[in-house]
Image: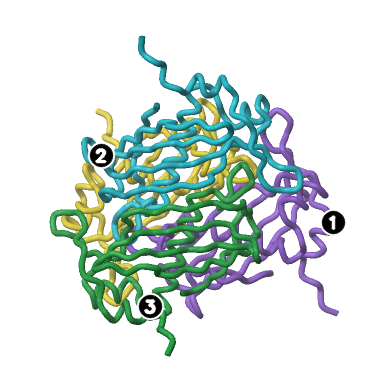
Chain colours: A cyan, B green, C yellow, D purple
Amino acid sequence: MNEIEIHVRFGECDPAGIAFYPNFFAWYDHGLWTLFETIGLDRETAAARYGILGWPLVAAESRFLSPTKEGDRLTLRTEIVRWGRSSFDVQHRLRRGDTPIAEGLEKRVWAAAKPGGGLLPLPIPEEIRARLSPVPAG
Amino acid sequence: MNEIEIHVRFGECDPAGIAFYPNFFAWYDHGLWTLFETIGLDRETAAARYGILGWPLVAAESRFLSPTKEGDRLTLRTEIVRWGRSSFDVQHRLRRGDTPIAEGLEKRVWAAAKPGGGLLPLPIPEEIRARLSPVPAG
Amino acid sequence: MNEIEIHVRFGECDPAGIAFYPNFFAWYDHGLWTLFETIGLDRETAAARYGILGWPLVAAESRFLSPTKEGDRLTLRTEIVRWGRSSFDVQHRLRRGDTPIAEGLEKRVWAAAKPGGGLLPLPIPEEIRARLSPVPAG
Amino acid sequence: MNEIEIHVRFGECDPAGIAFYPNFFAWYDHGLWTLFETIGLDRETAAARYGILGWPLVAAESRFLSPTKEGDRLTLRTEIVRWGRSSFDVQHRLRRGDTPIAEGLEKRVWAAAKPGGGLLPLPIPEEIRARLSPVPAG
């Protein structure tokens, strides 16, 4: 679980005066990279140590609960809520103070580039799961 | 139903060498505006004739079926697949030639700005539904 | 003068693995909004108190001194370096630690919307200049 | 010299109701890729045949002559106006019908990745210059 602040930019808002919705997904993506950063996992490490190009998306969804606009300082909470063999689900909760702004879910796969094009799913290393999973109490 | 070409830009792709996924939603949004354009509905008309600020999102989702990269020329097919009283669903299908690339669904609301902030859903005008609905066969 | 941190996002980088250059200008724009925020000037205040739609660009330029990539934490220093009657110049300096990354200059105009379209330059209020200008010593 | 159409997207416009200025540079970049596409030069070819990662920016500038907004169909003319040994200048002219919208200039370098980080300028191949230079008359 990780939290970051999103300071909404003017250029992320549209002529309706509210944040343009694809930017919510850009924030979610950034939230996951920042979560991985807390365990020292960046793009170079992912390539060198695990031979993957990253964790591309299989699916993504979001509900938009309340509009937000430039200058707003939001809190984005990012958490991995499911581990599969080579896929995992990431939950994102965005709020402004106590006001929920949006909730998102990404379905991603731990993948290398397939020779000839496309993506090759690989097993998620146990150490990655272990370091990002909640420690059971007791 | 409307189709547009998306010529994927280098700047829409990420260090993994494939289109960054929030851009798919930006393309979907553009597909809907272009669909509305076919019946002469733009932002100024929406404001002046109907008193709305637009059709903000309640929810959005996408499945990503095959990666795409800069230079690809994609076809985006956009269709309104459900009309509610003040909400509607928009389906997007993206393909490269015969290869499906992605499928998305947006849930939107026909809305004015609420005095004091927030969004006020309004009934979708009958003429809008009529002009964008499939004509039943005779 | 104001400084903000830019945490470079994966989605702001391109297939060459470095930040896509238009994003530097998006950071510069955000730097200016954040500078204006320090004196309580936001879009609503600009519209309500001064009757302007903002400070659109007449020209912009940047030199790119060293590449930057996702995960980098940059410092952006933004300063208004010239006040004209209705125009002003904004200087931006971006660095990573002690390494200069980029330098930019924006030429902007304090402007209302012109009836019928286009932009109407207005005189910059004295209080704005005063609050954002260096205080002379002595 | 190459021309493309830019169909301005709603999401490329900001709360002032006009195109957000960093997007002009994104269009310029896309104009150059499309110009290179006309001679069969894409990212994979650039890497495989010439060993470069691309043509990163040394500097960029633009003048903004008239605002543009979503739905506008612009014409972008892109031309390489100077060839150096490993650098070149790209001029971009953007218009809506006969109305000039913006003019930009990019200074780029033909470059490989330098081992250990940074960029290594390489000589521009003669065949690239030849195929993109105006044919002298007579």
Crowding near the residue tagged with mark 3, few <14, some 14–19, many ≥20 C-alpha atoms within 10 Å: some
Answer left or right for A75 relative to D8. Answer: left
Gap between marks 1 and 2 measured at Cα: 56 Å
Q: Nearer the viewer, mark 1 or mark 2?
A: 2
Q: Nearer the viewer, residue C39 or B109?
A: B109
Question: Visible in this render: residue D32?
Answer: no
On the same chain: label 3 and label 1?
Answer: no
**A36 up-or-down from C118: above or below:** above
The kind of secondary structure element at disc 3 is: helix
| Residue kind at label 1, given as amino acid type | Glu
Q: Which mark is residue A96?
A: 2
Residue that appears at 66% across and 57% down: D89
Q: Position of residue D25 (x, y in %)?
A: 53, 56
Q: Position of residue B132 (x, y in %)?
A: 38, 78
Using the image as rendered, state which of residue D137 and residue D38 is in the foreground: D38
Q: Secondary structure at mark 2?
A: strand
Quote the CA–CA distance across marks 3 and 1. 54 Å
The answer to whether residue B16 of the structure is visible from this angle is yes
Disc 3 designates what residue?
B132
Which is nearer the eye, C27 or C120?
Answer: C27
Q: What chain letter is assigned to the residue under label 3?
A: B
Q: Residues within 10 Å of mark 1 (few under 14, many from 20)?
A: few
Up/down of D75 relative to B63, above or below: below
Residue A111 x/y as whole percent: 63, 37
Amino acid at circle 2: Arg
Q: Tell me which corner region of the image, top left, top right, bottom left or bottom right, holds residue C77.
A: top left
